[in-house]
DNA sequence: TGGGCCAAGTTGTACAGCCAACTTTTGCCC
DNA sequence: GGGCAAAAGTTGGCTGTACAACTTGGCCCA
């Protein structure tokens, strides 16, 4: 009886999902790409069928395998899905691409939020917030302007960081902040004067804008950000299956 | 003992999810927005706790409610997530917005696929495909150019439709075609000559491009499309949560 | 050869129960 | 009143069972 090898931390179905993902990426499961039945997997890994189904649901949601009543599951593609954190963190995303993330903090200030900012973050009027402006680079080429708002308790942690700290997101995670949900809105805007100057593009040049909001497990807002990308440097990919969606960024 | 009222078709957890979604949207669950416990819901609806959990997992994945061990679930927001079909079908999306979808089919042809098209659709070289070019309007204003490729068996159905059929997607669904997964890639391109002429914008004007691929339950490609939107007419929103794993059991 | 039917295999849905992990409330003690 | 510990309440995770719905392949028969 085989044993899950993907580490010993976390829930069993998570480890099993990681195992199966690896097996799929490695190209196990023959040329026809048919997975063993749930029952077989359950016996192989020494867990119940319910646990196997939980693991497979993860892979299914990521578009890695089919699932259809009456027939075995089939491998669809090799893990192109990025993790939640790669989407959340520019630094991780860049590293996953094999590129060198960079950037500098241009401005960071603490001040009372204006009404529209309060609404974005879901705070009561007059609450204190932090504003952070950063220029982000990929292999030394500037590709993105990031304007982030943090509520006070989060912003205070950011302000304590080294000024050149690469990943704010990772630092927050290390301090115990839990990112549970994000919402991304993608559209197209024209570069304002500041954008053009910092990114080195023409004023009014078209930019891809990604606005994101992150909350913790209890639904409390953690950050709100307006990111503007130079076109051609990035593409957004959404995998959408009947019950769930997963978003990821791609190098354009 | 209350009974689920959301229709009598489909799985129970799905009907329950629809019920709860409605209740959330209607603003039940008091001002604090705390949901009843899983046990209470199970008794109210006369189902087991497992079924309640399946229903709640759907809402959780859509970002409607929190879920955190040790404390009750809390309403996060009212269904802002567009459903799978609204994302898949321009017509449904437009209707959900309260706008009048329109458009006309400019060209439809059947011919052998070139190599790159074969790869997009995952077909063997030389396979027959259908190409459809449509101009889409929202309240009579042209906002999108849609270039779609269909494999032969799907395209044949499209060709049989009335020439002015509004929603190809809905027609296919009625004929028993099942859309199970889509992948959308969003980036920015500049208008080509055709685009500019049809959309009435300047050549080289920036456009938002959405390329989408849809497959059925078995992973067989159903369509591949290149859609180009006039900026300012559309934004893409994605909800992304760590709890995709919360999807306990799902249907294909 | 072709079509139809049946049986085996597989996933989907639902139920019941148990314990663990975590949060909130209660109540006691100082 | 404040602080701390215990208890109650709630969700997460895992198992086991049973049946329904569906696909596939083989068999039989015309």
Image (tube, coloured by chain):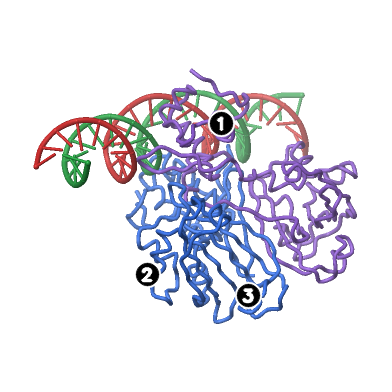
Chain colours: A blue, B purple, C red, D green
Which residue sits at x=76%, y=45%? B94
Q: Is residue A141 above or below residue D23?
A: below
Residue B23, which numbered label? 1
Q: Which chain carries label 1?
A: B
Measured in 3D between alpha carbons, the distance from the residue under mark 2 to the one under mark 1, in whole angstroms, is: 43 Å
Q: Earlier in the sequence, mark 2 or mark 3?
A: 2
Residue annotated with mark 2: A160
Same chain under badges 1 and 3? The reply is no
To which quarter of the image does residue D5 belong? Answer: top left
Measured in 3D between alpha carbons, the distance from the residue under mark 1 to the one under mark 3, in whole angstroms, is: 45 Å
Q: Which of D10 and B134 is in front in this view?
A: D10
Q: Is residue B1 above or below residue C13?
A: above
Query: Quick one: SS at disc 3?
Result: helix
Residue annotated with mark 3: A194
Q: Nearer the viewer, residue B197 or B146?
A: B197
Give the image location of residue A174, x and y in percent.
36, 63
| Relative to A31, D16 lies left or right | left
Disc 1 vs disc 3: which is toward the camera? 3
| Relative to B222, B54 lies left or right | left
Query: Quick one: SS at disc 1?
Result: helix
Which residue sits at x=80%, y=56%? B144
Give the image location of residue A164, x and y in percent.
43, 77
| Relative to A127, B148 lies left or right | right
To which quarter of the image does residue B81 belong? Answer: top right
Which residue sits at x=53%, y=42%? B64
Q: Which chain carries label 3?
A: A
């Amino acid at each position: 009886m085989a044993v899950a090898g993907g580490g010993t931390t976390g829930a069993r179905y998570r480890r099993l999902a990681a195992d199966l993902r690896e097996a799929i990426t490695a190209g196990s499961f023959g040329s026809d790409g048919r997975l063993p039945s749930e029952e077989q997997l359950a016996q192989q890994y020494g867990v119940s069928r319910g646990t196997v189904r939980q693991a497979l649901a993860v892979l299914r949601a990521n578009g890695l395998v089919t699932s259809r009543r009456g027939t075995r599951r089939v491998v669809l593609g090799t893990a192109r899905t990025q993790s939640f954190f790669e989407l959340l963190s520019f630094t991780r995303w860049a590293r996953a691409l094999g590129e060198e993330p960079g950037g500098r903090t241009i401005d960071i200030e603490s001040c009372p939020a204006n009404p529209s900012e309060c609404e974005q973050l879901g705070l009561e009027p007059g609450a204190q917030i932090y504003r952070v402006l950063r220029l982000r680079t990929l292999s030394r080429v500037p590709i993105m302007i990031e304007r982030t708002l943090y509520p006070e308790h989060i912003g205070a942690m950011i302000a304590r960081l080294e000024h050149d700290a690469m990943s704010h997101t990772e630092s927050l995670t290390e301090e115990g902040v839990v990112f549970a949900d994000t919402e991304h809105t993608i559209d197209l805007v024209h570069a304002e004067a500041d954008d053009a100057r910092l990114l080195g593009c023409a004023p009014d040049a078209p930019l891809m804008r990604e606005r994101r909001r992150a909350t913790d497990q209890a639904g409390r807002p953690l950050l709100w950000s307006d990111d503007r990308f130079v076109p051609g440097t990035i593409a957004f990919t959404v995998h959408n299956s009947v019950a769930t969606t997963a978003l990821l960024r791609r190098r354009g």
